[in-house]
Image (spheres, rainbow, N blue to C red):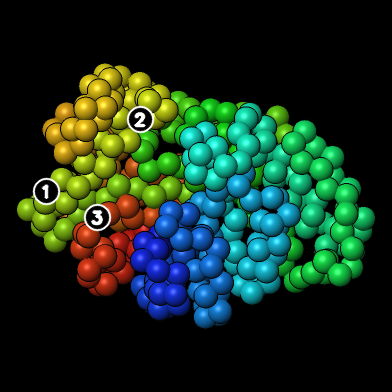
Amino acid sequence: MKADFYYPMTSPEAASSAVRQAADLGYEGFFSTETKYDPFLPLALAGAEGLDIDLGTAIAVAFPRSPMVTAMVSWDLARMSKGRFLLGLGTQIKPHITRRFSTEWGQPTARLKDYILSMRAIWEAWQDSSRLRYEGEFYNFSLMTPFFDPGPITHPDIPVYIAGVGPHLSRMAGEVCDGFHVHPFHTVDYLDQVVLPNITSGAESAGRSLDDVELVSPVFIMTGRDDSEVEQAMGPIRQQISFYASTPSYRPVLEASGWEFGDEVHAMSKRGQWAEMADVIPDEALFEIGIAAPVDKLGQAILDRYGDRVQRIGFYTFGSILESDPDAARQVITDLKP
């Protein structure tokens, strides 16, 4: 199993030193997110280091960007990284697309599929010097002159991953994607009942299999040198789980395990009781959504839960020992490898 470093995006310019540290610790992937900063810029700086580590967005929001814009920056990063770039895309939700980005929303699964297919048509035109002609449900591309054509690159097959929670995006990932970013708010029950069956169904409908889709997941980690430190790490994770649980769109994750506290924490969020919501999360949910184990047992605990389900793991922590102690992180990463 591969361990990936999720860049905290303290600033884009710090990515150069961060990727060197990640590679030194043994991480095999370096992922940036789209929060306060552009997700692609840190990867350009990280790629310039020339290290043997995958670089990816986890994720970039697709719809505010034309597929042509995303295709071009991805082409550049694939060239710079010598084929180690992984494009991760997400739909976001309607309020962000329409109110934060002021762009169009509608039929997100079908739109994202068309988005991916149109990008691949653009890449094919650049690589083969062929005529660009793509006509889809949402996107149409028919103009590419030599002045704007970047030309072929050595590694043109850019892997495309998408993020998702529910059955529709899971199925679409199986149909057309190279990978799927599992949301950190999940359980094994939800993976087994919803995500994996739908990826498999989508893959089989396209003449593919589950093995054609790499599953990537950040995981809530509660760890430390001993049981006392593990217990201290539980508080911030319980708080974060309560935040996700209060969001109605994530309710199916709770339902898969028969948990009924979603309505309660949602109502508390409406009243602004953010700190108090954590008290509602039972230990059962905390330990099924997250993983609690001392550092010396953490790698095996991750393998026991995800070994036959997920191929890449990231550590979702809040100031834990994995962030402050390089030796601890290196030990867990080593324990994940065969």
Identified by mark 2, the residue type is Thr
Instruction: Where is residue 122? Give x, y as percent.
Output: 79, 54
Identified by mark 3, the residue type is Phe
The answer to whether any part of residue 304 appears in the image is: yes
Task: Find residue 271 and name its label.
Answer: none
- Asked if labels 3 and 2 touch by Cβ distance under 8 angstroms, the answer is no
Answer above or below: position of 52 versus 132.
below
Instruction: Where is residue 53? Give x, y as percent.
Output: 51, 70
Separation of marks 2 and 1 at Cα, in angstroms: 26 Å
Q: In the rendered view, does 258 fall on the left or right side of 50?
A: left
Q: Tell which tag, 3 or 1, sits nearer the viewer.
A: 3
Identified by mark 1, the residue type is Glu
The answer to which of 224 and 7 lies nearer the viewer is 7
- Which residue of the protein is positioned furthest toward the right in this rendering? 131
Q: Earlier in the sequence, mark 2 or mark 3?
A: 2
Q: Earlier in the sequence, mark 3 or mark 1?
A: 1
- Name the residue at 28% across, 20% down: 263
Task: Find residue 318 and name its label.
Answer: 3
Q: Quadrant of the C terminus?
A: bottom left
- Which residue of the protein is positioned furthest toward the bottom in this rendering? 49
Describe the element under mark 1 as helix, strand or loop. helix
Separation of marks 2 and 3 at Cα, in angstroms: 21 Å
Circle 1 packing at 10 Å, graded few (<14), some (14-19), many (20+), is some
Separation of marks 3 and 1 at Cα, in angstroms: 13 Å
Which residue is label 1 attached to? 231
Q: In the rendered view, does 261 fall on the left or right side of 256?
A: left
Task: Find residue 247 and name its label.
Answer: 2
Describe the element under mark 3 as helix, strand or loop. loop
The answer to which of 14 and 331 lies nearer the viewer is 14
Instruction: Where is residue 141? Give x, y as percent.
Output: 83, 48
Q: In the rendered view, does 81 fall on the left or right side of 289?
A: right
Describe the element under mark 2 as helix, strand or loop. loop
